[in-house]
Amino acid sequence: MNFIYRKAAPEDIAILTETRIQVLRAANGLHEDTDMSEVEKESADYYLKALQDGSHTAYLVFDGKNFIGAGGISYYRVMPTFHNVTGKKAYIMNMYTHPEYRRKGIAYHVLQLLTEDAKERGVGHITLEATKAGRYLYEKFGFVRMEDEMILPESLSGRSAHLLY
């Protein structure tokens, strides 16, 4: 199958935002009637700014004109460490493949594109959160589980930190 992989641009914000909401609903087991209007608004704002300033790269996947998948990577910098002297980091998120197209190598190829983008930017420290369903793909790609990272159980907003993505 010849799928089209295209780097997202600001004119793709609607499809990126819609996909973001789908991913969050699935990852967190949310019903379709759960109000996501604030997350949708903030996601659109994020994409608009991050695609323009280069702090996020996303790829969209199409079968002809039909949208079938996506994935993104966010870039940020922390204080340099012995193992990461530049402090540059990246976080892969919003990986999605339409159910009818899963197990065809689409997500794997999106991961390749995203990690190549990171390497071109000199970023070697790449992390992600994996759902149970996605864990096999990420391990097959070469990601390993982290043992030393910790999280504070509640954010300042009072939302539970166990929610994914």
Image: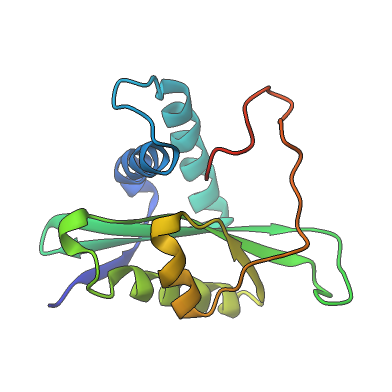
Depicted 163 relative to depicted 66: above or below: above
Asked where in the image residue 112 lies, by quadrant, the reply is bottom left
Locate the N terminus by quadrant. bottom left
Q: From this viewpoint, is residue 66 visible?
A: yes
Name the spot of residue 124 as percent of width and height, x first: 66, 76
Q: Residue at x 21, y 55 (%)?
A: 99
Q: From this viewpoint, is residue 123 visible?
A: no
Depicted 114 relative to depicted 160: above or below: below
Asked where in the image residue 120 lies, by quadrant, the reply is bottom right
Depicted 120 relative to depicted 129: above or below: below
Q: Residue at x 42, y 70 (%)?
A: 136
Name the spot of residue 79 as percent of width and height, x first: 86, 60
Q: Is residue 81 left or right of residue 31?
A: right
From the viewer's side, name the closer residue of 15 and 150: 150
From the viewer's side, name the closer residue of 34 and 79: 34
Name the spot of residue 90 as percent of width and height, x first: 62, 63
Q: Is residue 27 left or right of residue 149?
A: left
Q: Residue furthest right?
A: 82
Name the spot of residue 121 as percent of width and height, x first: 61, 74
Figure label count: 0
Q: Residue at x 37, y 21 (%)?
A: 34
The image's colouring method is rainbow
Depicted 22 relative to depicted 105: above or below: above
Q: Residue at x 36, y 46 (%)?
A: 16
Q: Is residue 74 left or right of residue 158?
A: left
